Amino acid sequence: MSSIVMEPVPAGYLLSSCSQMPKIEVNGKQIFQLELQEPSPEIKEKARKELRETPDVVEQAKKELQDLLREEEGLDTPYELDQYLVRYLRPTKFYPESALKLIKDYYEFKIKHKNVYDGLVPSKEKNIFSHDVITVLPKRDQEGRRILVLSLGKKWKHNKVSLDEFYKAAVLFSEAAALEPETQICGAQIIFDMDGLSLQQTWQFTPPFAKRIVDWLQDSIPLRIKGIQIINQPYIFNMVFALFKPFLRDKLKSRIIFHGSDRKSLHQHLDPSCLPEEYGGTMTLPLIHGLQWYEMLVKMEPEFEKINCYGYKKGAK
């Protein structure tokens, strides 16, 4: 039996006034929670090696980014909040100018695709969660990365769940993940499970949709996307990938790995201990299903509403 339990969060950490965040328990055992605590010494060492994250670098970068944001006309951000600054400095290795570019790209992207982003909160997206086709695995991978799984094959009823709904759910998950210090440092992996993809489903994909996804992953998400694992793909998946390929730059292209049904190949990138049995894994934690995610994310709604408050002022862009 699953339940949602509220736990206190560090003061001043969130954009909203929420003092508690939800976690998912099954039979009284914690299965998932947003990890907002200080990273472990091992993760801090990873941040030092990969992101230049030392106390002196962090303080200088925060000050410079704060000054840059203060001077950015027409852009409303909570630049006085340290955690907000670090959220964008970590993916850009604490280079303030690069962090400013990421912030501007992020908010410009939301304006460009306002039909998707305007008023995006969990309570409006119950449909996709009720179909149980997108989830985050309860265990991080061997490098501390979160793992997002999208099932775009036989589990997907394309006449009931649109690709835009998949996209919105992925955005909601990414916004939540970007709150976690360990995820900011280690990044995320994405699994696309294409088992049973049909010809009718491939027709749902269009070049504009493909471009939006690629632009989001490459330029407009404050997360380190460290790998995209394509599994169980049938031959007709080549038609889908052909839509995405023209928009991919070398960095992201090199992180897209095709495994088909070869679990040994998948396990070279994701350790079996973090994967469920259906992917050849040994993880014993129960998977979290769609409506459990919905219930959890709805309890975070004030934070999503606050995220939506910031950006370019009307007429500034």
Image (cartoon, helix red, strand yellow):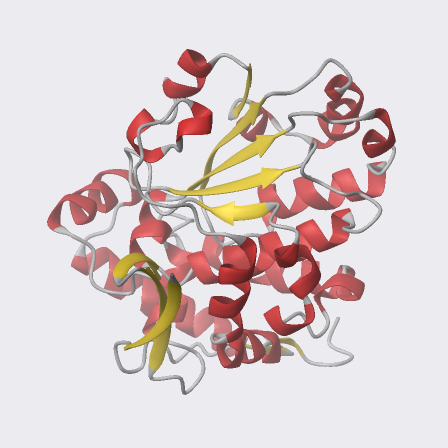
State the residue in front, 312 or 96: 312
Asked if residue 228 is positioned above or below residue 55 in the image, the reply reads above
Count of numbered circles in the view: 0
Going by the picture, which residue comes out furthest to the left? 41
State the residue in front, 304 or 133: 133
State the residue in front, 179 or 301: 301
At a point 32% along the width and 48% down the height, the residue shown is 185
Look at the image and tell me whether residue 101 can be seen: no
At a point 37% along the width and 27% down the height, the residue shown is 270
Q: Quadrant of the C terminus?
A: bottom right
- Percent x, y of residue 83: 34, 69
- Examine the image and state in which quarter residue 144 appears: top left
In the image: residue 280, left or right of residue 132: left
At a point 42% along the width and 49% down the height, the residue shown is 92
At a point 62% along the width and 37% down the height, the residue shown is 151
- Percent x, y of residue 57: 24, 56
Look at the image and tell me whether residue 185 can be seen: yes
State the residue in front, 286 or 148: 286
Q: Quadrant of the N terminus?
A: bottom left
- Percent x, y of residue 37: 23, 64
- Percent x, y of residue 192: 59, 33
Going by the picture, which residue comes out furthest to the bottom? 17
